[in-house]
Image (cartoon, coloured by chain):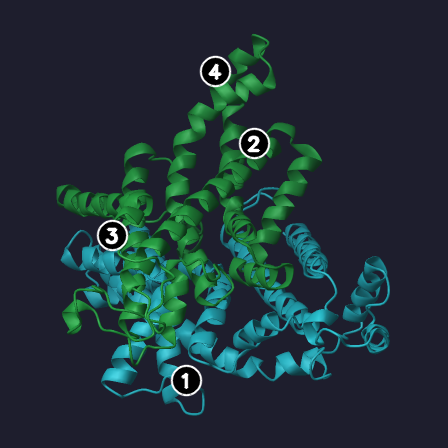
């Protein structure tokens, strides 16, 4: 088991290294970043000063070595635009992103698991079909379009909720509901299939046979067992959640890291974009690693070499 | 609590990855759902190919005396059935043009991902060893970064043209085909029919082209159908954020991006393309599910 985990960790680190390297070179394949910062006709002498200052006067390979060394020392470079540390710029946005992401996540787990369980318990009935249709619809819906529809109805027509910003708790409702609806659709599907599987197990028959009340059977015996595989599968959805929040933060002008990324990408701010991607990749890789290890514990038959994902 | 503890090993065996099939539970009554989905997809394809014949105005033609005119059912006139946008451009004409480009990018993008991924998967399964290791490592890399973030960065930094957009959108999802075709080829290579043609001395190309590929094609096509909605959504999201299709070209997502700024004054600009995308991806998802049940019971 230790060997299995160690190999997984090494693989994850290697994957992260490839992501960092690939992003570094792809972003620089676009030519001189100075031209996106300075207007045309800026004297070459001025440009040269900034080339030296930002370390882009050296060859690509030298820059890469320096960049990589800096990362290992915890220095993520400075923004080309306001000269602040990229780390500070990204970090001050993280709390808002975690607030939105955390709310979305808890919301969709509660809604998704509840709906999935209801669908499984009413297998083949109207409720089952209705919930599964809603779940397919929820991930066919472009999230930004759903956002606009909710804004139209709740903000512009009913005038209940604010459309942009993050100053009060009311501002949290629309973005988290928009993101959460899609996520809860897929969680409902996973929960339903896990639950159907559990309901067929012998211990459920035992619970029925010993006369446990229906509610106790479901809450005490079925749900905890269905929850384990569901939670591990939800771990893999994290990447999706981060990608989705980039879009939703932009639509609702939510001052989180995702919106910062869109802004930074628009002005080609290397340090900020690279740091954001590094953080996202390490978060997703860590989540996948944890899920993998969890699976390994739950099912010892997963072989060391097999890619269980 | 003890009961729960005892049963933990049993849960470890479960594989919740198998998605419940929507259609199977619909039984016979699901036929109408699939039929209407197919009809809608056919209609959208028809508009994409022949729509230009019915397009009332050029999609770039502005009319500054007729800005933000409402559609007919909201009290507008019949000259602009679905209303006009902020520059007085006819929404219906833009919609037809947008469907054309969105469908084009979606289909070509899906084809790129399917061909690239399946090819790499076959290569991995054929050569094994370090080639397989490297390719599976690339799959890990692809999975570790939400694709939309990568796509946004590439389009903003490397530059934006229709070709780059199609390639970027096409890369999305290649890893699913790669995994699928790799595992299918690995198992096919153990099967009698492959062993037989191999012992007859056929070249590798002929074995894969004539014998293995036809056997795994069905599953790959079903996978492509399941991926198509995601590709369409990706392009529309990128265009919505302003990093996808650029003016004067237009796609559904790009119209929506314009409509977002006029949501209060002219909600129809955003709602019309949004509805088209939603029902298109929904229909393809329904048909994909149905195909999976029909053609390929082995696919998850």
Are discs 4 and 2 less than 8 Å apart at CB? no
Q: A12 or A228: which is nearer to us?
A: A12
SS for dot 2:
helix
Q: Chain of mark 1?
A: A
Give the cyan chain's letter: A
Label at residue B122: 2
Q: Nearer the viewer, mark 1 or mark 4?
A: 1
Q: Nearer the viewer, mark 3 or mark 1?
A: 1
* Residue that carries the numbered disc 3 in the rendered image: A205
Both marks 1 and 4 on one chain: no
Label at residue B193: 4
Q: Residue at x 43, y 24 (%)?
A: B214
Q: Nearer the viewer, mark 2 or mark 1?
A: 1
CA gap, disc 4 to disc 3? 44 Å
Q: Residues within 10 Å of mark 1 (few under 14, many from 20)?
A: some
Q: Chain of mark 4?
A: B
Q: In x, y percent, where is residue A205?
A: 25, 52
Q: In x, y percent, where is residue B261?
A: 38, 77
Q: B154 or A199: which is nearer to us?
A: B154
């Amino acid at each position: 088991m230790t060997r299995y985990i160690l190999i997984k960790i090494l693989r994850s680190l290697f994957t992260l290294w490839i992501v960092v390297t690939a992003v570094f070179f792809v972003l620089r394949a676009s030519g001189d970043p100075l031209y996106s910062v300075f207007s045309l006709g800026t004297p070459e002498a001025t440009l040269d000063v900034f080339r030296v200052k930002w370390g882009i006067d050296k060859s690509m390979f030298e820059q890469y070595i320096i960049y990589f060394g800096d990362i290992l020392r915890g220095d993520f470079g400075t923004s080309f635009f306001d000269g602040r540390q990229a780390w500070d710029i990204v970090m001050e946005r993280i709390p808002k992103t975690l607030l939105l992401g955390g709310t979305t996540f808890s919301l969709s787990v509660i809604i998704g698991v509840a709906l999935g369980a209801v669908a499984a318990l009413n297998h083949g009935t109207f409720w089952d079909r209705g919930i599964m249709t809603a779940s397919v619809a929820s991930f066919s819906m472009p999230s930004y379009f759903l956002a606009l529809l909710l804004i139209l109805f709740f903000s512009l027509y009913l005038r209940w909720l604010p459309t942009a910003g993050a100053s009060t708790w009311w501002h949290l409702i629309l973005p988290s509901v928009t993101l959460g609806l899609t996520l809860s659709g897929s969680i409902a599907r996973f929960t339903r299939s896990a639950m159907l599987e559990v309901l067929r197990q012998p211990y459920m028959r035992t619970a029925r046979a010993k006369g446990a009340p229906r509610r106790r059977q479901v809450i005490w015996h079925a749900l905890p067992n269905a929850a384990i595989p569901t939670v591990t599968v939800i771990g893999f959805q994290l990447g999706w959640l981060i990608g989705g929040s980039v879009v939703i933060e932009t639509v609702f002008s939510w001052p989180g890291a995702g919106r910062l990324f869109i802004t930074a990408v628009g002005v080609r701010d290397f340090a900020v974009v690279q740091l954001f991607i590094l953080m996202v990749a390490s978060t997703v890789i860590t989540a996948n690693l944890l899920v993998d290890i969890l699976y390994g514990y739950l099912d010892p038959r997963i072989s060391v070499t097999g890619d269980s994902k | 609590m003890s009961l729960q503890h005892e049963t933990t090993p049993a849960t470890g065996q479960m594989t919740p990855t198998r998605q419940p099939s929507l259609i199977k539970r619909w039984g016979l009554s699901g036929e109408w759902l699939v039929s209407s989905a197919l009809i809608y997809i056919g209609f959208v394809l028809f508009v994409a190919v022949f729509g230009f014949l019915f397009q009332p105005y050029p999609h770039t033609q502005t009319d500054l005396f007729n800005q933000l005119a409402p559609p007919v059912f909201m009290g507008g006139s019949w000259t602009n059935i679905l209303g006009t946008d902020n520059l007085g451009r006819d929404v219906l004409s833009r919609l037809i043009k947008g469907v054309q480009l969105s469908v084009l990018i979606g289909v070509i993008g899906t084809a790129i991902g399917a061909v690239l991924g399946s090819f790499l998967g076959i290569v991995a399964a054929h050569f094994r060893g370090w080639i397989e290791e490297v390719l599976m490592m690339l799959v890990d890399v692809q999975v570790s970064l939400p694709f939309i973030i990568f796509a946004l960065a590439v389009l903003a930094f490397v530059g934006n043209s229709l070709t780059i957009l199609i390639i970027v959108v096409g890369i999305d999802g290649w890893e699913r085909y790669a995994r699928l075709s790799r595992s299918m080829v690995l198992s096919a290579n153990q099967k009698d029919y492959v062993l037989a043609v191999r012992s007859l001395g056929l070249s590798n190309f002929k074995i894969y082209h004539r014998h293995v590929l036809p056997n795994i094609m069905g599953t790959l096509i079903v996978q492509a159908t399941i991926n198509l909605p995601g590709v369409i959504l990706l392009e529309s999201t990128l265009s919505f954020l302003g990093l996808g299709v650029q003016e004067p070209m237009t796609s559904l997502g790009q119209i929506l991006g314009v409509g977002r700024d006029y949501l209060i004054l002219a909600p129809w600009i955003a709602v019309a393309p949004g509805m088209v995308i939603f029902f298109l991806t929904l229909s393809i998802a329904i048909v994909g599910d149905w195909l999976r049940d029909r053609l390929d019971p082995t696919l998850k």
